[in-house]
Image (spheres, grey):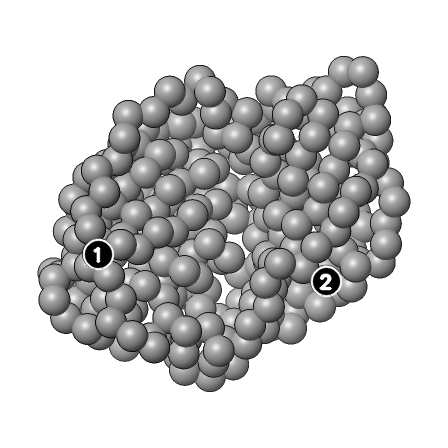
Amino acid sequence: MIERYEILLEVQSEQDPLWRSPARGTLMHGLIMSEVGADSLHSGASSVRPYTQHLQALSPGRYVWTINTLGEAAAPLADWITSEQKKLFLEHYNLELQVGEVKKVFSNTYSEFMDSAFEQMPPKYVTFEIVTPMVFKKSGQQNVWQWPEARLMVQSALSRWNCFAETAKLDDPQILEDISSKVQPSSFQVKSQHVSMDGVNFAGTVGKISFVVQNRTEVRQILNLAGKYSEFCGLGAKTAMGLGAVRFLASEVSRPVKQRNWREHEGQQLAG
């Protein structure tokens, strides 16, 4: 089962240390670990976490915490989310958070999700908006920036799909070969952004990148599924700690990525 929860949080203090904090995702992940427990959130033999999360600012002191659960292994987390918590406490900042509305905004089985992604010929243009820094290892290193190639992004999404999907595995190596040869970047507005977690530096990407897909139904379907699923599973490393959150848009018309004033969205950029 794929589910998404959105939780409205308000800082109960005149000062809001989260507003400019580059460690929001890490702090919220630590909160999950302390409240639910690391031992309760394992996905069998895999080391992949069965959930992703990120915190977005609405205004100073007001946030939306998005948590995506990807399978049965995340059931303890879903139970905690819906347990009618009134307040949360971030020990790092000695900060109390008031819990507002808690909504389950999406719920699908993996079969339903695939049927929806494959039900018709998907559009030929797709755009990924990278909301929080997306980090990939390059030559085994995470502090070396890597260009966000379509193959790399699809591989990241499908590896999680194959880890949690009850049926309909997508593990044919030819899938990634087809993505490499049939999907090309059409426009982009991205930049590198460094993130530090527990003293370790990561080189990530934020911004927008669009791809055009050649006229092959199966390739478009796979890219459409991977893109839609990436909104829940995230892309790259440390998605449980707030990195790699993305939005996905498909269109029949090429939509050049507009120039953007990054300072206007600085609070959201640093959500990792």
Image disc number at residue 142: none
Quadrant that contains the C terminus = top right
Q: Quadrant of residue 51?
A: bottom right
Cα separation between marks 2 and 1 = 36 Å
- Residue at image x 38%, y 34%? 206
Q: Is residue 190 above or below residue 164?
A: above
Instruction: Pinpoint residue 1: horizontal percent, then vertical percent.
Output: 58, 73
- The residue most toward the bottom is 167
| Residue 151 located left or right of residue 101 | left
Quick one: 18 or 86, which is closer to the camera? Answer: 86
Residue under the point 76% across and 32% down: 10
Dot 1: element: loop
Q: Are marks 2 and 1 in contact (CB under 8 Å)?
A: no
Q: Is residue 266 visible?
A: yes
The amino acid type found where label 2 is placed reads: Ala
Farthest residue, direction front: 253
> Mark 1, residues whose alpha carbon is within 10 Å: few (<14), some, or many (≥20)?
few
Give the residue at mark 2. Answer: 78
Q: Residue at x 53, y 60 (%)?
A: 48
The answer to whether residue 67 is left or right of residue 173 is: right
Instruction: Give the percent coordinates (x, y) of residue 39.
Output: 73, 61
- Residue type marked 1: Glu
**Residue highlighted by disc 1:** 252
* Label 2 Cα neighbours within 10 Å, binned few <14 / some 14-19 / many ≥20: many
Can residue 237 be spotted in the picture?
no
SS under mark 2: helix
When asked about the image quadrant of residue 76, the answer is bottom right
